[in-house]
Each structure stands twice: as C-alpha cells, then as structure tokens.
Image (spheres, rainbow, N blue to C red):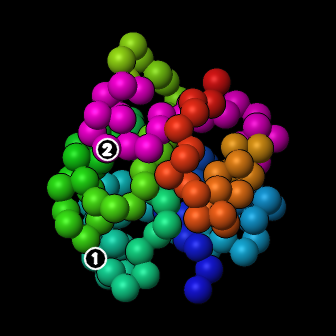
Amino acid sequence: MAATILLIDDDADDRELFGEALQRVAPHIHFESASGGQMAFELLESKKQHLPDLIFLDINMPVIDGWHCLSILKSIEAFKHIPVIIYSTSAPDGAQEAAIRLGALSYVLKPNQFSELKQLLARVVALIDKKAILSFSTTHQ
C-alpha cells in the first residue's frame, strides 16, 4: 500500500496547493486532508487499519488549534506513533521547542513559493520512501 500524508489545515487554498505540490513531486504518495482537528480525528478513526505515515499540522485553526490537536494525537494510543510536522505561517519564540516537547517531529514554516513547497515535500517524501522520516528534524526557513 502506498504511503499516505495527511494535512490538517483550515485554509482551503493551502490544502489545495499542498496537494498539488505533493502530486508533482511524488504521485505515488496518497494525500488526504482535513479542514480541522475534529474532521482529522473522524478521518483517523475511520482509517485505523490504514493510518497516515505522516501528518502535517497547522497551528492557527479555529475550534481545535494545532497545539491542542497535537496534544490529543499524542495522547491516543492508536495515533501517538504517527510522526507530526507542525506546518505554520509563523514561528513565535519557543514554538519549535514547544512542538518537539509535545511530540512533534519538527516545526516547519509554510514556504512562500510553490517551488519551495515542492522542495520541502521532496525531502520529506525521500525520507518516507526510505522509511527514515523520523530523521526529519530541520526547520524550513
């Protein structure tokens, strides 16, 4: 079965661009998205036999923000093993350290350019393909 990446982000344009970039760099990777934490948990519950290999998680979302979503993900036995990369437009002081402390793999700033997004995803996909995604720990500036 093909590897899967789940993007949890309330911005429809960001979800569309992410999916398009992923399709261009790795058409073999299955892409799923959720517009918020609640939808993501429903999706994960429905796919317990085929959980994503990686989750990209936006921080600034209504209802369940990314921090709370990350805490919940890491507290549920069935989901806590899924690597999570925080994927945000901002990086306040201490955010990367907080993300790592809460169980995220890394904290990545959303790229401004489509080409930069493709480069980021190509690096991540290469690690997924090698089964080495847990070694992804650099920030993208």
Rendered location of residue 60, percent (x, y): 38, 35
- Identify residue type, mark 2: Gly
Q: State left or right for residue 54 relative to residue 94.
A: right
Read off the residue under disc 2.
103
Q: Quadrant of the N terminus?
A: bottom right
Mark positioned earlier in the residue sequence (2 or 1): 1
Read off the residue under disc 1.
45
Camera-nearest label, 2 or 1: 2
Instruction: Name which residue lies at 18% across and 55% down.
Output: 75
Rendered location of residue 70, percent (x, y): 29, 47
Q: Is residue 11 magenta?
A: no
Residue 17 in view of the camera: no
Whether 107 is drawn above or below 47: the answer is above
> Element type at marker 2?
loop
Instruction: Name which residue lies at 50% across and 52% down.
Output: 134
- Identify residue type, mark 1: Glu
Query: What mark, if any, has residue 137 been given in the picture?
Result: none
Question: Which residues are the magenta region?
Answer: 96-118
Alpha-carbon span between mark 2 and mark 1: 20 Å
Rendered location of residue 62, percent (x, y): 30, 42
Instruction: Name which residue lies at 46% across and 69% down.
Output: 52
Q: Is residue 107 magenta?
A: yes
Residue 133 found in image quarter: bottom right
> Element type at marker 1?
helix
